[in-house]
Image (cartoon, rainbow, N blue to C red):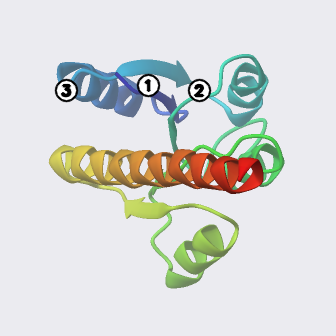
Amino acid sequence: MARIALVDDDRNILTSVKMTLEGEGFEIDTYSDGQSALEAFYRKQPDIVVLDIKMPRMDGMDLLQKMRPKISSPVIFLTSKDDEIDEVLGLRMGADDYIKKPFSQRLLVARIRALLRRQAQFSDSLVVGKKGRHLLERG
């Protein structure tokens, strides 16, 4: 099953979301700040990253900016920042989704599954494309 990284400085959020996602069959790694998450991502890239914006040591926007050159995992911001400009900025910086707190755990699960589905479809099309190109090169 997919590995999801949860990055949030609120222990209650980490605990409740982790329980929900594990109940859905996902493997979960939790981090309470952006710096420790980034260091771990270089060792073990998650399939999806769910992160808060307001965190100590490195906020979510900085984490996204620093991870993007090497880590292509889809990112969902899960944050209490509810200004439209924050949402637009997060999406422009490379986030794939933006969910405002308080949030529905069912909605979070649905959006994670949607991103994983798209990611799998994209991966399948790359494999087909590589095979097709390989056949053309041989012919």
What type is the residue that disc 1 sits on?
A: Arg
Label 2–label 1 contact, CB within 8 A: yes
Q: Position of residue 9 (x, y in %)?
A: 55, 33
User: Residue drawn 70% across and 35% down?
Assistant: 34
Residue 11, numbered label? 1
> On screen, 86 above or below 59?
below
What type is the residue that disc 2 sits on?
A: Ser
Residue 66, numbered label? none
Compared across the picture, whether 127 is left or right of 1 comes to right
Among numbered discs 1 and 3, the one appearing first in the sequence: 1
Among numbered discs 2 and 1, the one appearing first in the sequence: 1
Looking at the rendered structure, the secondary structure element under dot 1 is helix
Residue at image mark 3: 24
> On screen, 88 above or below 102?
below
Residue at image mark 2: 32
Residue located farthest toward the front when viewing the structure as drawn:
139
Compared across the picture, whether 115 is left or right of 91 comes to left
Local crowd size for mark 2, using a 10 Å CA cut-off: few (<14), some (14–19), many (≥20) = some
Distance from Cα at disc 1 to Cα at disc 3: 20 Å
- The quarter of the rendered structure image containing the N terminus is top left
Looking at the rendered structure, the secondary structure element under dot 3 is loop
Specify the quadrant of the image occupied by residue 23.
top left
Q: Position of residue 20 (x, y in %)?
A: 22, 28
Viewer-proximal residue among 98 and 80: 98
Q: Position of residue 111 (x, y in %)?
A: 30, 54
Distance from Cα at disc 2 to Cα at disc 1: 8 Å
Distance from Cα at disc 2 to Cα at disc 3: 22 Å
What type is the residue that disc 3 sits on?
A: Glu
